[in-house]
Amino acid sequence: MSFSYKEKKRKNSVTGGLTSAEVFLGVTTLNRTVVSHTVFRLLGIPGLEDQHMWISIPFFVSYVTALLGNSLLIFVILTRTSLHGLMYFFLCMLAGADIVLSTSTVPQALSIFWFHAGQISLDRCITQLFFLHSTFITESGILLVMAFDRYIAICYPLRYSTVLTNSLIGKIGMTIFLRSYGTIFPIIFLLKRLTFCKNNIIPHTYCEHIGLAKYACNNIRVNMWCGFSVLISTVVLDVVLIFLSYVLILRSIFRMPSQDARHEALNTCGSHVCVIILFYGPGIFTTLTQRFGRHIPPHIHILLANVCILVPPMLNPIIYGIKTKQIQEQIVHVLFTNYK
């Protein structure tokens, strides 16, 4: 027996025009917009799941090397009075930031590779990206200050101790951390206001701002503009100022009358320049590949993004240990002399 048109209309108004199965499952348009994922799953490196165990080996080696190298560097600088200079103080800050940067991401990646433990809560995901982005900005700020230190030491050597006083050093260090955490802190609230109803599968080894925000049903234009403004006002500005600093440094070096003086000045900047290239180089290359390399497989982008996290913390202490004679001597003394 068929229903009348009015009866059909009444039933459709109750069920919203959905089938009985859709009504039973509760899959309504309204529910889709209300439900927000609070748990996500990190896939690691999609497309290379069968290679995760092999990929974990360089991750693990890099992480252990970063922890041991930077911890040793901090220990040597703090315990040796001959290394209590300004340059070594900033180097100690850089080593600490390297430990935080690698620890905020690599253990999570290893848990995915080894135990398939990719589940992560929204709050933990936001916490991870907060420390990841803020630490990256911290390192950029430290490299800028180290460039300023080299600029004063080479261009105005007689005024070095009067310009870079202990009071100014303390203010600079505080400014670096306040800028880092202050610029990233609003992102927490911008993410917490979003409703994540599109998907909860993240094809990556760690959480990052826009990578998480794109799964929201809301308009994320504010998030995108905030991320862009933070990038321009911190990292991009730092790169420009570092470049200008070294232009002035090189101009001053090549004006020196003595070839030995020029060689010594260039040698003091060598390790810092290597670290700068190592820190910004992979990030710039990754950005270019994401922008123009549309035919590059997704797992290549993810691997490049992890290179930015893995390589600088691993190689920074090695570079300074090799290029800086004072640090090299003290490390040899700590590792070998005390145990003879």
Image (cartoon, grey):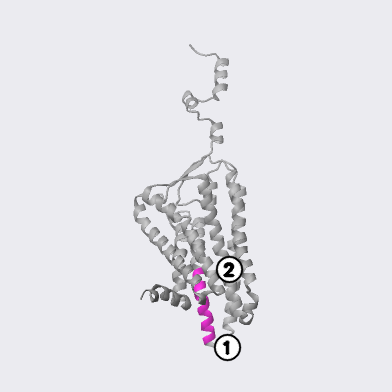
Eyeballing the image, is 303 above or below 258?
above
Residue at position x 58%, y 43% from top? 194
Q: Which label number is shown at residue 16? A: none
Q: Nearer the viewer, mark 1 or mark 2?
A: 2
Q: Which label number is shown at residue 144? A: 2
Magenta run includes residue 222: no
Disc count in the image? 2
- For the question of whether residue 296 can be seen, the reply is no
The answer to whether residue 32 is left or right of residue 116 is: right
- Range covered by the magenta-colored residues: 260-276
The residue to which callout 1 is attached is 257
The quadrant in which residue 245 appears is bottom right
* Depth check, front residue: 221 or 326: 326
The quadrant in which residue 195 appears is top right
Disc 1 crowd, CA 10 A, few/some/many (<14, 14-19, 20+)? few
* Depth check, front residue: 90 or 214: 90
